[in-house]
Amino acid sequence: MPLDEISIARRAVVNLGAGPGIQPEAALRNMSASILNHAESGMGIMELSHRDVGGPIQTLMQDTKDQIKGLLAVPDSHEVLLMHGGAWAQFAAVPMNLIGDAQAQGFGCTSWVRTGNWGDIARGEAEPHLPTHTAASFDPTTPGGLAVPDFDSWEVRSDAAFVHLCANETVTGIEYKEDPDLAQIVANQAGRIAADGTLQPGRAEVKTSTKLLNQASDLPPLVGDFTSCLLARLVDISKYGVVYASGGKNVGPSGVCVAIVNKDLVDSRTAHPLCPAVMNYQRILDQDSRLNTPATFNIMALHEVLKWLESHGGVPAAQRWADARSGAVYDAIDSSGGFYANHVEAKDRSRLNVPFRIPKRGGEGFDVELEADFVAEAAARGLQQVHVALPPALLGGNGAKQGGGLRLSMYNALPVEDAIKAAQFMDDFRRRHA
Ligand code: PMP
């Protein structure tokens, strides 16, 4: 197919996939050139050694790390690691690197901010190491008004090896749009510990005053899963001990994983003796992300995606696009007179992943058949990968048995006009089926 026909074919599609999802076409074209002849070397990206000192792969890796540092204003205290195994590998790597010798370090738990399924999955990987503690939780039983837990509701324990949050829950569709200031949270918490050891207001069930942190020294590090929102908003990296995001969405292809780690934190913790070398932050740091053979193709692809973002206004532009795209789709939901329902409080609605349902008219529950029609009609109009994949807690009523649910995902590479097309389709579908 000649290139212009490829472009025409691509433009006929609105790719609303949750991941692997849309990548910028210009970046994809550069990737295909690099497959055959990387950086004018006469050799393809898959044919070049990472051990060639100062050679094309080492240059590529350095450039890619520098791009991430530039785009996200990563402070000097932190380093970018280019790792393997996606975010799932980080779910395991985080406890193995940050707990180390729990007894020697006085760690009694890892601490979790619950916002949906991805945070819970990560927590599952930490459970074999130490008891896990809920720092704060969304309420999955209120499908009408899900929200991220307010920073002030977090309970920070002095014996936590780390506190973990998921910045954007890809399935639940809720997003922390700001970065927490753990020192501030602890200062507020200190003022809320009552004489009887309970945390007031609201957490009367909590009687752990001996373990509640009441001073902002010795803060546990904050760890953030940014898989579905990295590069879609400015992040205050200095607030985090570890930020990680796998590819498949805004960070190039799946498989690769960017981990931005605080170097002092890595120095101060001893990895678990069973931590595989390939997941050991200190060893990856010491080896400049070349402990084993890096995923060179994926890193090249990531580099091209970052180049594209840099030349299109960087993260501030991406933030504006995300606002515009999600604004158009949430407007279609909010102006539908109840035909569509999104279950997230407006302030916490994800700008990247918009899950919604079609409630049954005049009845309880959701119209699963109509949702299936939505998916089929959308596909016929070129709106692809509209997933029907909400977890039971969000489905409402007997949703678990019914299945159903709709989700539009809109990552950096999706043109704003494509989100507008999706919103127009939603209006049109509603008019025809209401
Ligand atoms: N965290 C979040 C928020 C995700 O959306 C995903 C993938 N959809 C993951 C983690 C897992 O990423 P991977 O499949 O790359 O391991």
Image (cartoon, rainbow, N blue to C red):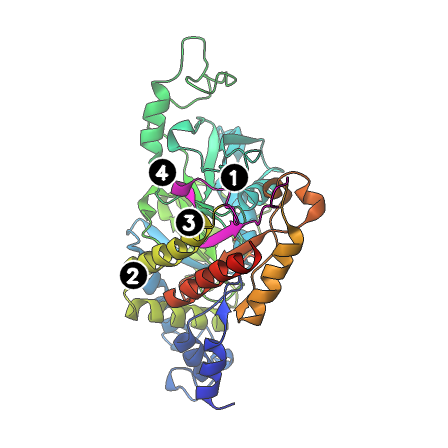
The amino acid beneath tag 2 is Ala
Measured as percent of width and height from the top left, residue 41 is found at 40, 86
Q: Which residue is mark 2?
A: 317
Nearer-the-camera pick, 173 or 181: 173
Q: Which residue is mark 3?
A: 243
Crowd around label 1: few <14 · some 14–19 · many ≥20 (10 Å):
many
Nearer-the-camera pick, 388 or 80: 388
Q: Which residue is mark 4?
A: 180
Nearer-the-camera pick, 165 or 215: 165
Residue 295 horizontal side relative to residue 125, left or right: left
Majority secondary structure of magenta residues: loop
For image coordinates 43% across by 87% down, the residue present is 4
Which secondary structure lies at badge 1?
A: loop
Crowd around label 4: few <14 · some 14–19 · many ≥20 (10 Å):
some
Identify whether 174 is placed above or below 311.
above
Report if the CB atoms under discs 3 and 2 are less than 8 Å apart: no
Q: Which residue is mark 1?
A: 100
Q: Mark 3 vs mark 2: which is more N-terminal?
A: 3
The amino acid beneath tag 4 is Pro
Q: Nearer the viewer, mark 4 or mark 1?
A: 4
Q: Mark 1 vs mark 2: which is more N-terminal?
A: 1
Measured as percent of width and height from the top left, residue 271 is found at 51, 44
